[in-house]
Image: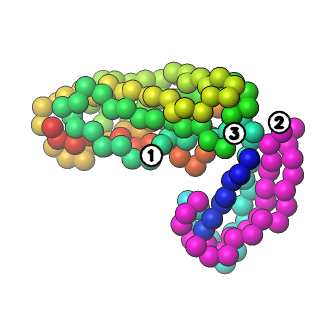
Amino acid sequence: MDKTLTGTSNDYARAVQETTDGGFIIAGYSYSGISDDKSETSRGGMDYWLVKFGLSGELNFAFTNYDVSEANAYCDLYVTRTGGSVSNVNVNYATVDGSVLAGTDYVATNGVLLIWSDGETNAKLVRVGIINRYGAAGARNFRVVLSNAVVAVLGARSNAMVNIRKG
């Protein structure tokens, strides 16, 4: 398994340990701010980190932001499996209200399961219905969240924002 973690400053892995599931846990520290693989700003000086990699892969949304016209019947989001393909894995996804409400601007989806077979790495489709409010103005958004990954691990992009724009 090849995996690279990078930032824009000095980043150091200090310890690696194999886990009982055949993956690895890596501890280290970073002087980088938000950049490349680092998703949070520096807390001042050196930040410690702990990362787990499994042979069964990491599940992420392909993108963290999706834009859709309210005139579309649905928004398609894709979930990827990278960094491993050993074993069957699955994950739940659900919609979460943002500035819009389920049933008014989009169709709520909760507890739905995506499944990958052993060796399978193709992206899986998450389709959320969009309700046309015929020209409703303003910024409107909701989130789709991955949860309860079985065997695989959730990556840094386990939340996606869907922005609904005027038709």
Q: Any mark on residue 84, and which? A: 3
Marks 2/1: CA–CA distance:
28 Å
Outermost residue, left side = 135
Residue 90 visible? The answer is no
Q: Does the magenta segment cover residue 24? A: yes
Element assignment for label 3: loop
The residue at the point 55 percent across, 22 percent down is 113
| Of callouts 2 and 1, the N-terminal one | 2
The residue at the point 44 percent across, 46 percent down is 63
Q: Any mark on residue 21, and which? A: 2
Marks 1/3: CA–CA distance:
19 Å
Q: Which three-letter amino acid code belongs to the residue tagged 3?
A: Gly
The count of marks equals 3
Q: Which three-letter amino acid code belongs to the residue tagged 1?
A: Phe
Q: Quadrant of residue 130?
A: top left
Q: Position of residue 37 (x, y in %)?
A: 58, 60
